[in-house]
Image: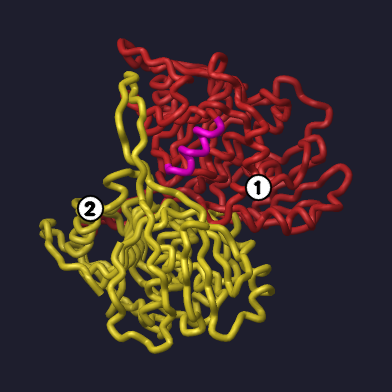
Chain colours: A red, B yellow
Amino acid sequence: MLIPAPATASPQRPSLSAARVPLTRAVEVLDESGARRTLHIPAERPLTLYLDKRELVTLMTLGAAPELLTLGYLRNQRLVERVEDIESVVVDWEVGAAAVTTRSGTADAAARTRQRIVTTGCGQGTMFGMLMEELEARRLAPPAVARIRQSTLMQLSEIMRTQDSIHRRAGSVHGCALFRGLEMLMFVEDVGRHNAIDTIAGWMWLHGDSALGAGDDKLFYTTGRLTSEMVTKAAQLGVPIVISRNGVTQMGYELAQRLGMALFGRANLHRFICYCGFERFDSEPQAEPAPVRVSFGG
Amino acid sequence: MLIPAPATASPQRPSLSAARVPLTRAVEVLDESGARRTLHIPAERPLTLYLDKRELVTLMTLGAAPELLTLGYLRNQRLVERVEDIESVVVDWEVGAAAVTTRSGTADAAARTRQRIVTTGCGQGTMFGMLMEELEARRLAPPAVARIRQSTLMQLSEIMRTQDSIHRRAGSVHGCALFRGLEMLMFVEDVGRHNAIDTIAGWMWLHGDSALGAGDDKLFYTTGRLTSEMVTKAAQLGVPIVISRNGVTQMGYELAQRLGMALFGRANLHRFICYCGFERFDSEPQAEPAPVRVSFGG
């Protein structure tokens, strides 16, 4: 997991703890023949969010980037309007808590919480309806400026494949990355796809993307499926091109079409499918994928 | 998707609609070279649950078994105590609604809803804490009676592999099945793992498993990962043996250990891992997997 320092640190940037915790655990298992082996499995632990001492929600997370996850959750649930409103996020793994303190208090948080949190989840409760208007108002960058070539897509898959990850060591996590061209700005894994993209959202918020157009030159890459909620969250970030190693559902597809987002799925080193947003895709029938070396950083 | 008739229909069994809707959609895509192809993608649609005309929640679902999904959701969220309390579940896909009518009204549903629904989701909000006491009180069948052989595990993987499915046609869905030995009692797919297991829970509820011990002779097979919430839901059903094509997270593992549940992961025709509950597993070092033919039905 990478947390590069912001290029231009805002004076109003919240202070974040840097809580660390083991991300895998070794367990003794039996294989199919009954022989003992040692495997690693990914951690999963509860993190309870408190906003100005009010309990909000408990997220089950790998624990790789709890401060950014907390920020992203607050942002995507619209519980805090601007990142500058947050004074600090302090995570304490001893008690599994993330304490968020705002600069001016959150008088209306109780009302917002009741309204909003019941609508979150992985297909169980969604913000779909209420967000559509907002998403359509926030236009994605036009295809002339936000497009991608076949060779770039294959290089991105190669970068994701060779990324050091919990998934390679222990499986059973989803990875998400934010790219600018071939530059990986942020990479995170979590037990839930939603947590992973919320963490990316937290990173973008912290790095001042609240300006319209901050997502224009970004690409979002996920190992998980592209359901309506993943497309919605990418659209909230203003990212016009989304790539998955996995497939797409009908509602993810229809939503992306409506928003003019390009969706690429089943992506690997040699193949992929462009589901929609054809006008953002430059095919290069002669291109050969080549392993790349890139430097990471913000 | 199979909905065999219950062996002994209860006079108090709720009446269910049999709403049907297309589960895949054909879309025109581009492959990596820019060539046009037609692919199928799984449906994903909102289903809003109403309990005695009160709106409860909107689930995003494939739509394969909306009535059973509704039942399972009500059960797992503890919104209705007994399946006999439900008079009918009527799904209307024109408006994306599931109307649940109880026999005696649900005076306290408002209070229950507020308390419970905020805790649902895919890692974002969990019922973990409040359920542990209840789960530990509901003891799983002892290893002497609830155990599984290596050859049975491999045959189950073969049955799952050859099952006609949306996943084979369109990908991007999770499948869940309930077995008694090699007999597949129920198979369902959904865009969310939680919906799939909730649907199994609905089926079990409808078929009178509220009696203690009804899960004793059952096996639960899922294509999804075994996180804390999946283990929790299997434990709520009283199923002592859970198998996944995928892996396990630390909290799923620790919870299963505490409850004495056997978890098998990375299961395919030739291999699997027994993560815990070794005492329920009979290895057969000489066993050869063999394709099987079984008849499905309840």
Disc number at residue B103?
none
Query: In the figure, is residue B61 to the left or right of B244?
Result: right
Q: Is residue A246 magenta?
A: no
Write the residue at 23% across / 56% down: B163
**Residue B278 appears in view:** no
Quarter-wise, where is residue B39 in the image? top left
Write the residue at 48% across / 67% down: B70
Disc number at residue B161?
2
Quadrant that contains the N terminus of chain B: bottom left
Residue A150, x across and y down, in percent = 39, 17
Write the residue at 57% across / 53% down: A121
Residue furthest right as drawn: A104
Neighbor class of circle 2 (other Cα within 10 Å; few <14, some 14-19, many 20+) is few
Quadrant that contains the C terminus of chain B: bottom left
Quarter-wise, where is residue B190 in the image? bottom left
Query: In the figure, is residue A26 to the left or right of B79?
Result: left
Q: Are marks 1 and 2 on the same chain?
A: no
Q: Amino acid at mark 2?
A: Arg
Label 2 element class: helix
**Residue B161 appears in view:** yes
The secondary structure that most of the magenta stretch takes on is helix
Q: Amino acid at mark 1?
A: Met
Query: In the figure, is residue A26 to the left or right of A189?
Result: left
Label 1 element class: helix
**A288 is higher (above) or lower (below) than A6:** above
Please report, as a chain letter, where disc 1 is located.
Answer: A
Structural distance between the alpha carbons of marks 1 and 2: 39 Å
Stretch of the chain drawn in magenta: A249-259
**A104 is higher (above) or lower (below) than B102:** above
Disc number at residue A130?
1
